[in-house]
Image: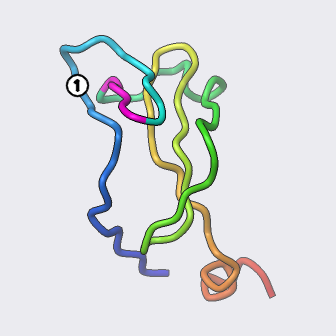
Amino acid sequence: MNVILDKIETIVEYSASKAAFNGYPERIVSPVSAGPCCVAEMRQLGEIQSSPSGPYFYKACTTCGHTVRHFLLTLDQATEAGLVD
C-alpha cells in the first residue's frame, strides 16, 4: 500500500521547549518525541475527522502530552493491502 499524506492543517505544535498543553480542539502543544508512558497512556481526543488522506483522530498521552494523528484505513485501503477479503 502506498499512501502519500497530504499537507493537511494540524492543531498540533511540536516543541522541545514549551510545556505540553491540551487545548483541543483549537490547539495542542506536544513534546517532539513519544515517551515510554505513551505505549499504555494514549487516548483518543474528540471525534473521527476526515481528510483527503482518509479518516483520522488525534491521540494524546495522558501522562506526557505527546500527540499524534492516528489515521484509520478505509475498507477499500484494507482490501487493497490484503488485510481483509
Camera-side residue: 1 or 44?
44
Quadrant of residue 40 in the image?
A: top right
What's the residue type where badge 1 is placed? Ser
Q: Quadrant of residue 59?
A: top right
As drawn, the residue found furthest toward the right would be 85
At which x and y percent is residue 73? Answer: 61, 69
Secondary structure beneath dot 1 equals: loop
Q: Residue at x 23, y 25 (%)?
A: 15
- Who's the residue at 47% across and 15% down the image? 64
The residue that label 1 is drawn on is 15
Q: Residue furthest front?
A: 26
The mark tally for this picture is 1
Q: Which segment did they paint magenta?
A: 26-31
Q: Quadrant of the C terminus?
A: bottom right
Q: Is residue 63 above or below residue 38?
A: above
| Residue at x 55% of width, y 19% of height | 37
- Percent from the top left, x then y, of residue 49? 55, 57
Q: Tell whether position 30 is magenta.
A: yes
For disc 1, the neighbor class at 10 Å (few under 14, some 14 to 19, many from 20) is few
Q: Is residue 32 above or below residue 5?
A: above
Q: Position of residue 75 (x, y in %)?
A: 70, 80
Q: Is residue 82 magenta?
A: no
Residue at figure coordinates x 39%, y 34% from the top left: 26
* Residue 85 located left or right of residue 63: right
**Quarter occupied by residue 19:** top left
Magenta residues: mostly which secondary structure?
strand
- Using the image as rendered, state which of residue 25 and residue 19 is in the foreground: 25
